[in-house]
Amino acid sequence: MGGLLPAAVLIWDAYTGALGANPIQRATLQTGLLTLTLLVLSLACTPLRLLTGWTWPARIRKALGLLAFGYGALHFLIYLLDHGFSLGAMTEDVLERPFVTAGFTALLLLVPLALTSGRNSVKRLGFARWTRLHQLVYLAASLGALHYYWGVKKDHVPPLIYAGIIAALFLVRFLKRGPVGRRGRGRPGPA
Ligand code: HEM
């Protein structure tokens, strides 16, 4: 429930005019940052569990991932609104601007992950296959950071910090547990 608070604040700010002179741009930036931050937080859950033995990060991982997808979809929706919901203009933008291509690909990668986030999907796909599929979240987050890096005009430090955190989380996960193929099968626990 608390994860919906930023959306409520955004709607309130839009309603009261607090988003400034260019509310669509401001809303795009805010939802983009929120998406990337939630993605990174969801990625941090497994390394945190591996490093500390705590079990609570694994319990909030799915909610964080779904929230990231939700805010990513909202970010995309605001972008579409900015382009008059013209699929032609969007396709042209996706094909011609690498910055938009990266963001669009990141969001597309999150779709199968959101669709298979339930327990039934783990059973249906089998644990090893499900885990491999969900490792795509690292690629999605990296593309999100690249999209951010290419999108900012001046200060490239924040996107580089996000990229560094994603690389560090991947390293911890890899060193502590190894790729799926190297692990024993059937041991429960997400990517
Ligand atoms: C997982 C997917 C995505 C993530 C993590 C993401 C993240 C971000 C971030 C962090 C920013 C910059 C915020 C800032 O400068 O403060 C941003 C800006 C932007 N994103 Fe995304 N994005 C995603 C998907 C998309 C998609 C699918 C589109 C459109 C097809 C898109 C279009 C834009 C645009 C146009 C801006 C720049 C707004 C401006 O400077 O006016 N993004 N995004």
Image (cartoon, rainbow, N blue to C red):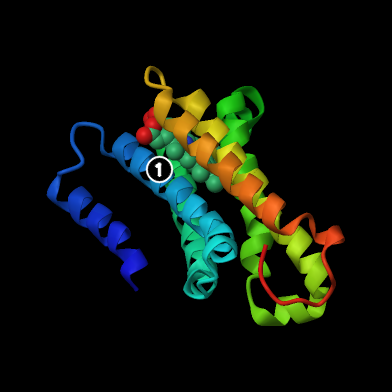
What quarter of the picture does the N terminus occupy? bottom left
Q: Secondary structure at mark 1?
A: helix
Mark 1 surroundings: few (<14), some (14-19) or many (≥20) residues within 10 A: some
Q: Residue furthest top?
A: 154
Q: In the image, what residue occupies the spot 61% across and 38% down?
A: 143
User: Is the distance from the Cβ of mark 1 to the nearest ligand 1 atom less than 8 Å?
Assistant: yes
Task: From the viewer's side, name the closer residue of 182 and 27.
Answer: 182
Q: From what the image shows, is residue 141 above or below residue 22?
A: below
Q: In the image, what residue occupies the spot 58% across and 48% down?
A: 169
x and y, in percent, of residue 188 in the image: 71, 77
Q: Is residue 172 left or right of residue 160?
A: right
Q: Is residue 26 left or right of residue 113?
A: left
What quarter of the picture does the C terminus occupy? bottom right
Q: In the image, what residue occupies the spot 33% across and 34% down?
A: 25
Q: In the image, what residue occupies the spot 79% across and 55% down?
A: 179
Q: From what the image shows, is residue 53 above or below residue 133?
A: below
x and y, in percent, of residue 31 in the image: 38, 47
Q: Which residue is mark 1?
A: 33
Label 1 is placed on what type of residue?
Answer: Leu
x and y, in percent, of residue 141 in the image: 58, 45
x and y, in percent, of residue 160 in the image: 48, 29
Residue 83 visible in image: no
Task: From the viewer's side, name the closer residue of 14 and 45.
Answer: 45
Residue 144 visible in image: yes
